[in-house]
Amino acid sequence: MSETSTSAVDAVPPAVAGRLRITEIFHSIQGEADAIGWRTVFVRLTGCPLRCVWCDTEYSFHGGEWRAIDDILAEVASHGARHVCVTGGEPLAQKRCLILLQRLCDAGHEVSLETSGALDVAAVDPRVRKVMDLKAPDSGESARNLWPNLDHLLPHDQVKIVIASRADYEWARGVVAEHALERRCMVLFSPVWGKVEPRELAEWIIADKLPVRFQLQMHKLLWNDARGK
C-alpha cells in the first residue's frame, strides 16, 4: 500500500504506519490568503504529483522525515500559535493528512490547507479553510485542475490563481466569470514573483472591475525565498 497518490514519496514502511512524511515544521508569519499577517505554524508535508514551472518549494518533493501525528501536534502546540497552515508540496497526496487536519481542528486551532486543486477535497474537515489553487496555463499544469472541487468550496474557503502573464490573467478572468467564483468564496489573484509586476496585475484588476482580491506574498517581501520563513 502506498502512502500517497504519487511516486514522489516511497512506500510506507510498516514501522511508520499512522505517520506522515514531513519536510519541515516552522513558526512564522502567514504571508497570504485571508490569514495574512497572523503568527502561524506551518506544517509542510513531503511529496507532490504536480510540477508547476514557477514552484518555489521544490525541496518538498522528496525526502522528509516520518513523524507520528501526536508528535506533530505536540510541536505545533509548543509554538503557542492559534493559526496552523498545512501545506506542501501537495499535502493531500498523503492520505493521513485528513487525520492531521481533523486533529488540529479538534485541538482548537484555526487551520488552513494549501492545496493544488488537482486532488479531491471532498473529505477535508469542513472546519478547515481550504486555500485551493486553480492552475493557469503558464503553470504547465492547468490540465490537472479538478473542476468538481468547486462544488466542495465553503464560504470561508479561498480560490487562488497565480498569474505569470497577461494570457494567464485573461484565462483567470474568464474562469471567475464562467464559474461565478466570487459567489462561492473569496478569490485571490497573485503575481508570479519576477514574472508579472504587482502594480501591473493590480491595474488589470482595477480596469476590469473584477470581484477578486489582489495579494502579494508578504513572506517574500520580508525574507525573500528563505526556507522555513
Image: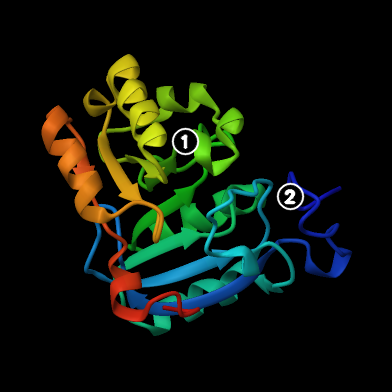
The percent coordinates of residue 50 (x first, y second) are 65, 46
Side (left or right) of 182 relative to 106: left
Q: Quadrant of residue 31?
A: bottom left
Residue ID for mark 1: 136
Residue ID for mark 2: 4
Query: Residue farthest to the top?
Result: 178
Residue type at mark 2 is: Thr
Q: Using the image as rendered, state which of residue 29 and residue 3 is in the foreground.
A: 29
Q: Using the image as rendered, state which of residue 4 and residue 171 is in the foreground.
A: 171
Q: Residue at x 56, y 49 (%)?
A: 98
Which circle's residue, 1 or 2, is located before the other in the chain?
2
Q: Using the image as rendered, state which of residue 11 and residue 103 is in the foreground.
A: 11
Side (left or right) of 221 relative to 85: left
The percent coordinates of residue 199 (x first, y second) are 19, 53
The percent coordinates of residue 71 (x first, y second) are 58, 77
Residue type at mark 1 is: Ala
